[in-house]
Image: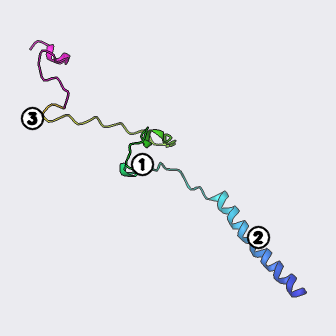
């Protein structure tokens, strides 16, 4: 019986050391914070089954809540189309029906 009690006391002591080490880690170690972005390919957001979903899955997902100490990055403006590129489908090609106010300025 004394050997069993000695074994239990030794195991309790080791368990106490383990808990003390974990407690010390929570008190003395600061993991820091950083913003994490994980891109999900669009093909992974498509519902299987061949049919289009009633509402795209990307719209039904909640917006991510990120907290960062760094200032927000400025969005990059969209690239201008090339001068020799054809106008996009549905664009006005007749100069009389063009609603661009910059074209109305005198030269």
Q: Is residue 90 magenta?
A: yes
**Residue pictured at 42% horizontal, 48% vertical:** 47
N-terminal of the pair, mark 1 or mark 3, is 1
**Residue pictured at 78% horizontal, 78% vertical:** 11
Residue at numbered disc 1: 47
- Quadrant in the picture for residue 94: top left
- Quadrant in the picture for residue 9: bottom right
Of badges 2 and 1, the one in the foreground is 1
Tell me the distance, in whole angstroms, between the alpha carbons under discs 1 and 3: 38 Å
Quadrant of the drawing holding the C terminus: top left
Residue at numbered disc 2: 16
N-terminal of the pair, mark 2 or mark 1, is 2
Does residue 52 lie above or below 2 as drawn? above
**Residue pictured at 20% horizontal, 16% vertical:** 101
N-terminal of the pair, mark 2 or mark 3, is 2
Q: Pointer 2: residues within 10 angstroms few (<14), some, or many (20+)?
A: few
- Quadrant in the picture for residue 21: bottom right
* Residue in front for this viewpoint, 19 or 96: 96
By what rule are the colours in the image chosen? rainbow
Q: Position of residue 23 (x, y in %)?
A: 70, 62
Report the span colored magenta.
89-107
Q: Determine contact: label 2, label 3, CB under 8 Å.
A: no
- Inspect this view and state whether residue 71 appears: no
Does residue 62 lie above or below 105 as drawn? below
Secondary element at image label 1: loop
* Residue in front for this viewpoint, 78 or 93: 93
């Amino acid at each position: 019986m004394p050997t069993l009690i000695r074994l239990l006391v030794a195991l309790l002591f080791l368990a106490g050391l383990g808990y003390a080490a974990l407690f010390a880690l929570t008190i003395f170690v600061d993991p820091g914070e950083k913003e994490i972005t994980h891109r999900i390919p669009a093909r992974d957001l498509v519902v299987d089954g061949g049919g289009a979903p009633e509402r795209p899955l990307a719209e039904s997902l909640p917006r991510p809540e990120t907290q960062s100490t760094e200032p927000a990055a400025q969005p990059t403006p969209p690239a201008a189309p090339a001068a020799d590129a054809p106008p996009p489908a549905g664009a006005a090609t007749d100069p009389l029906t063009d609603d661009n106010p910059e074209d109305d300025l005198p030269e």
